[in-house]
Amino acid sequence: MDPDSRAPVTLDGACHCRAVRFTVLLPEGLASARRCTCSLCRMRGAVAVTGSIARFHLLAGADHLATYRFNTGVAEHHFCRTCGIYTHHKRRSNPDQFGINVACLNGLSPFDFREIVVFDGERHPSDDPQHRSRVAGVLRYEPADG
């Protein structure tokens, strides 16, 4: 799968223990991959892609999902109660979208992406309407084997 592809794609995903399983449409394909500098994302360290809330279908594990909210309480961060893996979150910047953990998508890894845009979540666009999403930098992965 081409990490730079903007073609919409539907993928299956799951947490580590596979108790939580889902399918989701990524309307921007894998090109939407990003990281964030907010306090939670810094600690979580996941690469997320944009998923459609309307086309996210939980196939199993509703009873295993837990939700964490902080600060404004708008964003909903979902994770498996059993294995603890973050699977997806409803975005504060756009509550009509999910951020989907790339590592939970079948056949994908965060290390498939050579460069990931990092957004400035410390100065969230919802806190300062004059400024839209700010790019804080780029995270690069260079495999040792070339």
Image (spheres, rainbow, N blue to C red):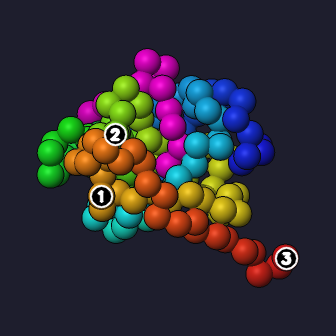
3 or 1: tag closer to the N-terminus: 1
The label shown at residue 123 is 1
Which numbered mark, 1 or 2, is in the foreground of this view?
A: 1
Q: Is residue 132 left or right of residue 78?
A: right
Element under disc 2: loop
The image shows residue 42 at horizontal and vertical percentages of 37, 67
Quarter holding residue 29: top right
Of residues 83 and 29, the one nearer the viewer is 29
Q: Nearer the viewer, residue 35 or 133?
A: 133
* Residue behind mark 2: 93
Q: Which residues are magenta?
A: 48-63
Q: Residue at x 66, y 62 (%)?
A: 115
Label located before the other in sequence (3 or 2) = 2
Image position of 118 with respect to 10: above or below: below
Residues tagged 3 and 1 counted as in contact (Cβ below 8 A): no
Which residue is located at x 68 percent, y 58 percent? 113
- Which residue is labeled 3 in the image? 146
Q: Residue furthest front?
A: 130
Q: Position of residue 64 (x, y in %)?
A: 29, 40
The quadrant of the rendering that contains the C terminus is bottom right
Which residue is rendered at x = 26% and y = 48% of the image? 128
